[in-house]
Amino acid sequence: ETGVTQSPTHLIKTRGQQVTLRCSSQSGHNTVSWYQQALGQGPQFIFQYYREEENGRGNFPPRFSGLQFPNYSSELNVNALELDDSALYLCASSSRVNSGYNEQFFGPGTRLTVL
Amino acid sequence: AQTVTQSQPEMSVQEAETVTLSCTYDTSESDYYLFWYKQPPSRQMILVIRQEAYKQQNATENRFSVNFQKAAKSFSLKISDSQLGDAAMYFCAYKNYGGSQGNLIFGKGTKLSVKP
């Protein structure tokens, strides 16, 4: 069974640029969530995708957008990068099979640096 | 809005001894989940233990146990027989019952060092 993978591992961008981060969910999982973890902080929920549709969003501006593909992999896009977007971006996948809580499995993250 | 507070930025424990990490939270909900996650230097978040608020019995997973005090909104993690591999950042997290699966609310974390 393959775990959650993310690419790239590290990324450096300049202010104003756009970035796309990728996540492959664990086999059998249909739900992907994205989190932003600033240095010295806990992760903050950005949004979640279920069956290719956004299914919940945290307090992030519209320049943070995402996609989920038929194979349940996902992309996080950030436009007009700002210095404060520098963070570790974590992806987590889960299998939404019942109304209870289904454990999320996290990837190793993408470290984004905005200069 | 719900909040999670971890008041200990750093903790240290001797190998084989016991350490307790503190967490308090604020919510007006009666049904929710609480979690402790471990984040080693590899950055991958790993679920350590989970507690459902409706369960009075404290959760236990091998050397890890929690002290869940619902009225006090307190959720501490006890690590017994500490091992070098326990060294990591530990995050306390909260989730409302129902709603989006992904909306975990994390504290700022506690960095645990284990001394040989």
Image (tube, coloured by chain):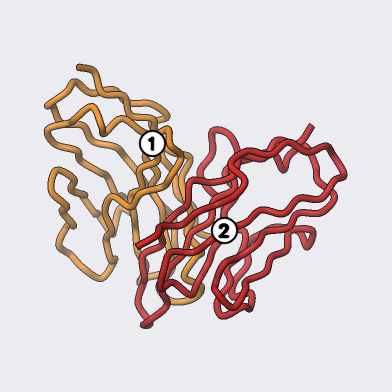
Chain colours: A red, B orange
Q: Specify few, some or many for label 1: CA neighbours under 10 Å numbering under 14, 14-19, or 20 or more.
A: some
Residue depicted at x 57% and y 58%: A23
Residue A98: quadrant of the picture:
bottom left
Residue depicted at x 23% and y 27%: B84
Residue B70, x across and y down, in percent: 28, 59
- A59, A67: nearer the viewer: A67
Q: Residue furthest front?
A: A1
The residue pinned by badge 1 equals B40
The residue pinned by badge 2 equals A23
Q: Which dot, 2 or 1, sits closer to the camera? A: 2
Check whether the beta carbons of the residues at disc 2 and disc 1 lie within 8 A of each other.
no
Residue A63, x across and y down, in percent: 79, 58
Identify the chain of the residue marked 1, using the numbered disc in the image: B
Q: What is the distance, in whole Å, between disc 2 and disc 1 at their CAs?
A: 20 Å
Q: Residue furthest right?
A: A16
- B70, A25: nearer the viewer: A25
Amino acid type for the residue under numbered disc 2: Cys
